[in-house]
Image: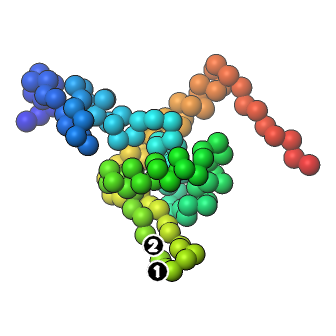
Amino acid sequence: MDRKELFEKKPKIKINNKISFCPTSAAMELIGGKWKSVILTHLIGGKRRYNELRKEIPGITERTLSLQLKQLEADGMINRKVFTKKPPLKVEYTLTEFGQTLSPILQSITEWGLFAAESKGEFLFEETK
């Protein structure tokens, strides 16, 4: 079935046991919220450890980062690889092949965010000592 035919039939979409009535809602089920797309954007550049993500994403709490990483893993967006069996664990996160399909979209959102900052806002730089 081609895209046009699919849109004409207006099927409901089920992802994670939630029913969506349009593809945008279905997509947002996977990447919506304040932090998921931010985390995914940081993983575009390659593997990251938990603490690297914490440092790169100021404002996110440890609990939220942990929960979002678990959800992204459950949704098949990221891989979690554990390298040691006893503490301290070394864990790395990477995008799955499915997660990598979001790269161009996330990069476009980043570019639009820069445009929005230039057009509607301003850039604030911290002074270095």
Residue placed at 11% from the left, 34% from the top? 2
Q: The residue under label 1 is which amino acid type?
A: Lys
Classify 86 as above or below 6.
below
Quadrant of res 76: bottom left
Residue placed at 87% from the left, 46% from the top? 128
Task: Please state if 40 lies on the left or on the right of 88 as rendered.
Answer: left
Q: Quadrant of the N terminus?
A: top left
In front of the other: 49 or 70: 70
Classify 113 as above or below 36.
above
Classify 36 as above or below 21.
below
Residue 80 visible in image: yes
Task: Please state if 59 lies on the left or on the right of 21 as rendered.
Answer: right
Q: What number is the disc on residue 116?
A: none
- Image coordinates of residue 31 in percent, x first then y, are 40, 40
Residue 100 visible in image: no
Residue placed at 51% from the left, 80% from the top? 86
Which SS class for mark 1? Answer: loop
Quadrant of res 70: bottom left
Marks 2,1: beta carbons within 8 A: yes
Q: The residue under label 2 is which amino acid type?
A: Val
Q: How is the image coloured?
A: rainbow
- Image coordinates of residue 10 in percent, x first then y, are 14, 24
Q: Residues within 10 Å of mark 1 (few under 14, many from 20)?
A: few
- Image coordinates of residue 75 in percent, x first then y, are 32, 50
Nearer the viewer's eye, disc 2 or disc 1? 1
Which SS class for mark 2? Answer: strand
Task: Please state if 15 lies on the left or on the right of 104 as rendered.
Answer: left
Residue that carries the numbered disc 1 in the rendered image: 85
Q: Residues within 10 Å of mark 2 (few under 14, many from 20)?
A: few
